[in-house]
Image (cartoon, rainbow, N blue to C red):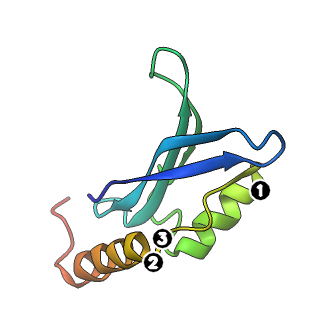
């Protein structure tokens, strides 16, 4: 599983979470996004990519974030390259035991 820190913005208030996490989960075969934890760090206001193949592309993940009122663009080219590299390496590996 890959995990990278990015900034996610709540569109309506322009409030941002500079410690949000984006990544690729190999067992679930999905990109995921986590942002805006509560004061205890237990609950997240935004948590996408918790189901099998929920978001097979970053475009699908962004569309889901936008539909919930959040955005994570622009994403740095370096971070984007790392995410896509993780995805391509994981996709070529044999499926996890299950």
Q: Quick one: which residue is furthest to the right in this view?
A: 12
Residue 9 is situated, as x and y percent measured from the top left of the image, at: 67, 48
- Which residue is pictured at 39% across the width and 69% down the height? 79
| Left or right: where 42 falls relative to 61 | left
Name the residue that disc number 3 marks: 76
* Quadrant in the rendering for residue 85: bottom left
8 in relation to 27, above or below:
above
Name the element at disc 1.
helix
Q: Tags 1 and 2 in contact by the CB under 8 Å rule?
A: no
Name the residue beneath numbered marker 2: 77
Circle nearer the N terminus (1, 2): 1
- Measure the C-alpha gap from mark 1 to mark 3: 22 Å
Distance from Cα at disc 1 to Cα at disc 2: 24 Å
x then y, percent, for residue 12: 84, 43
Q: Are marks 3 and 2 in contact (CB under 8 Å)?
A: yes
Q: Nearer the viewer, residue 51 or 35?
A: 35
Q: Where residue 32 appears, x then y in whole percent?
A: 46, 56
Question: In which quarter of the view is residue 47 placed?
Answer: top right
Residue at the spot of label 1:
67
Nearer the observer, disc 1 or disc 3?
3
Q: Quadrant of the N terminus?
A: bottom left
Left or right: 45, with 83 as reference point:
right
Residue 95 appears at what percent x and percent y?
Answer: 21, 72
Please, what secondary structure does the residue beneath circle 3 have? loop
Give the alpha-carbon distance from disc 3 to disc 2, as whole Å.
4 Å
Name the foreground residue: 37 vs 47: 37
């Amino acid at each position: 599983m890959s995990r990278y820190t990015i900034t996610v913005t709540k569109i309506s208030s322009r409030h941002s979470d500079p410690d949000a996490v984006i990544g690729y989960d190999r067992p679930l075969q999905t990109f995921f996004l986590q942002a805006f934890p509560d004061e205890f760090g237990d609950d997240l206001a935004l948590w996408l990519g918790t189901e099998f193949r929920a978001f097979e592309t970053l475009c699908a993940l962004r569309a889901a974030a936008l539909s919930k009122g959040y955005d994570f663009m622009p994403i740095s080219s370096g971070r984007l390259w790392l995410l896509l590299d993780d995805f391509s390496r994981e996709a070529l590996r044999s499926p996890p035991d299950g």
